[in-house]
Amino acid sequence: MAGPDFDTEIKQLTATMSTIEQVLDVAALQREIADLEGQVAAPDLWDDQANATRVTGRLSALQGQLERFASLRSRIDDLAIMVELAAEESDADAAAETEAELTKIKKAVEALEVRTLLSGEYDEREAIVTIRAGAGGVDAADFAEMLMRMYVRWAERNKYPVEVFDVSYAEEAGIKSAEFAIHAPYAYGTLSVEAGTHRLVRISPFDNQGRRQTSFAAVEVVPVLEQTDEIEIPDEEVRVDVYRSSGPGGQSVNTTDSAVRLTHLPTGIVVSRQNEKSQLQNKASAMVILKAKLLAVKKAEEAALKKELKGDVQASWGDQMRNYVLNPYQIVKDLRTGFETGNPQPVFDGEIDGFLEAGIRWRRGADKAAEN
């Protein structure tokens, strides 16, 4: 690539970064970080563990966001220097290295630019993710656990705190369902495109005849509520069941009826919580999640998108939004966006940014088409 092309590319990248800086409001970001750092330094921070977790989690996420922006801008500045040195020395190897760096930077800027597309009412919220095993028996339960691990690994890669609320383990392997929160700005807007039915095709490790098995799992994503999001639920609309916690745990697990299951009778929405030590704590936490789900339903009804936001999917044939095929060939393909990869293992290890970015762009296009 000739020098003038590098110059044009760098100018375009610089202009895009300026736009991103305005949309992210970097100055406001820095002020919020300073405020959160002051709260973290308070000696009584951990007197309220829930608030401390929220504050430290948001601080970590915002610091990471600001660091990614600053690092990317620095790389663009360094790229300009690389271009000058390569031109002065007429070094082919240096020119090739510069071109490779340009490609990497363009990809990183595109990924950061996707954040500017998250402008929905709740997009900036943290997310509550629910995964349910669908059709497919033990393979579906195993697949549900694979998906949970995929999202948790994605959060870990981005240094986002994860809080597991409830896991219902299947008898033979995997999980029947799981519910967890990802505490990061824009987690809801980013992960909401994952809502729907996911389909796995593979040689079943649970079939002694080695037959190929198709299984399904449903993913639901709702935003975490804030104190200003008031939604009233009459007591008579909620059935409360208590039971003994299950699965691995400490001294408080499997010893008392501390786990709580809330059923919202008008909608049939069920929320379970068992990770707190007391029944009252689990009930309070479950109520927060129930309100979040009802808020999502309300928002979905207003926008005529109930199925998408609520995650009201059957987790069976004809309903899938993404295929994970491990046999007779290997591919992961999103049926809405067409984005795909021929290497499923990194996807299951949390490398899903390409699918998320494609989904966000696809949704933005669908929203514009609906407006028109």
Image (cartoon, rainbow, N blue to C red):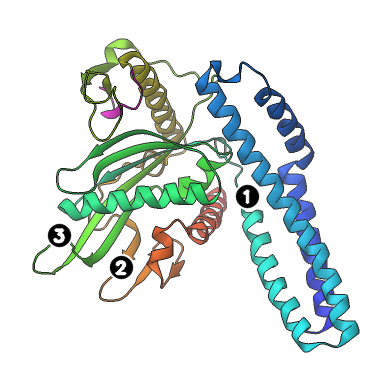
* 3 w.r.t. 118: above or below: below
Q: Is residue 352 above or below residue 133?
A: below
Determine which residue is flagged by label 3: 206
3 or 2: tag closer to the N-terminus: 3
Badge 1 local density, few (<14 within 10 Å), some, or many (20+)? some
Residue drawn at 56 percent across, 20 percent down = 46
- Where residue 63 appears, as percent x and y from the top left, is 67, 41
Q: CA distance from mark 2 to mark 1?
A: 29 Å
Q: In the image, what residue type sits under mark 2?
A: Val
The image shows residue 209 at horizontal and vertical percentages of 8, 69
Query: Dot 1 corresponds to which residue?
Result: 115
Contact flag, marks 2 and 1 (Cβ < 8 Å): no
Percent across and percent down for residue 187 are 53, 42
The residue most toward the front is: 251
Dividing the picture into quadrants, the one containing residue 234 is: top left
Q: Secondary structure at mark 3?
A: loop
Compare residues 192 and 173 and report the one nearer the observer: 173
Disc marking residue 325: 2
